[in-house]
Amino acid sequence: MTVLQFNFLSKYLGYQTNVTICLPRPSQEDGADFYRPGMKFQTLYLLHGYSGDDTDYRDFTGIVRYANEARVAVVMPAAYNAFYSDNPHGPRYWRYVSEELPQVCQSLFPLSAKREDNFVAGLSMGGHGAMKMGIMKCEAYAAVLCMSGVSMNPDKLAEVTDRRRARHADAAADDLPTIDMASLYGDPDHFKGSVNDVWHYARLNVEAKKQLPKFFITVGDKDFLREQVEDASAYLTGLGYDTTFELVPGYGHEWDFWDLSLRKALREWLPLRRSVIYPDEG
């Protein structure tokens, strides 16, 4: 696997930002003609969680090996603690990750732009981001993987802050800031039905008879976000989304679980070609 980190000036963020990307490399079985003009890869956009950045998956999971085996490229942006949303008074991380990032990466690297060749995944905060990408950009992604995903149920929005505060109440060494919904989304009272209400758009997609991505949703049975994850899975299933849910015993909110989930997704769940896309193959 070729792993590189590049940096570019984002028009939606207003500053330079880092992206880590993995591109499959040839094996001994591929022979000398692996690299050909016009070749493309299927692509997984992989979104990190709260307090993370673009290097998390590279450093804490086996994503490089799993993706190389699956012959899929992986794009990992840095979105810090922005919840993959446009700050009303700051950087527009939603437009960056949903519009600018795919455009830049598909222009610079051999990545297929076809819907059936693109997938999005994330953990925790990134699980929310993946759900948001899959629903609000459903024309761009064939499948979505949400691992321990934060659920932005508009009727339970305050719980995101309350649960985080409760989780860290007794952790003296923890100095992570509390999630401030107002700074992320503006007035929380106006969140329901707004451009940030993913649940609202999930329903609108069904009503408009749009092509819906397949969802794979997974969480450990000891995860403090378990109820939120189950809530989101039940909601999407009730709307008619093709949803696979898995509750995995023995795991909490941890890298061992997310590594396990990525390995399973790339080996079993995601609809992958497991081969390079050459020009004569469409």
Image (cartoon, grey):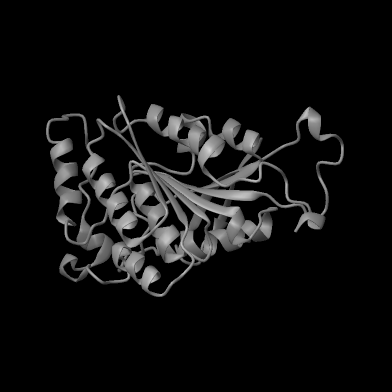
Q: Quadrant of the C terminus?
A: bottom right
Image spot of residue 174 (x, y percent):
21, 33
Name the outermost residue toward the right.
32
Q: Residue at x 64, y 58 (%)?
A: 106
Q: Is residue 14 visible?
A: no
Residue 46 appears in view: yes
Q: Residue at x 30, y 62 (%)?
A: 199
Along the viewing direction, whichever of 184 and 208 lies nearer the viewer: 208
**Quarter of the figure that contains the N terminus:** top right
Q: Could you say where residue 42 lies in the image, as x and y percent from the top left?
A: 63, 50
Which residue: 41% across, 65% down?
Answer: 136
Q: Residue furthest top?
A: 250
Nearest to the observer: residue 67 or residue 100: 67
Residue found at x 41% / y 62%: 135
Q: From what the image shows, is residue 75 above or below residue 10?
A: above
The total number of labels drawn is: 0
Q: Quadrant of residue 217?
A: top left
Residue 177 in percent (x, y) is at 22, 45
How far from the left and from the top, in percent, is residue 117?
A: 61, 54
Residue 10, above or below 151: below
Q: Looking at the image, which is closer to me, 115 or 94? A: 115
In the displayed structure, would residue 190 be above or below residue 230? below
- Residue 30 falls left or right of residue 248: right
Q: Nearer the viewer, residue 279 or 57?
A: 279
Q: Quadrant of residue 166?
A: top left
Image-based side of 104 in relation to 173, left or right: right
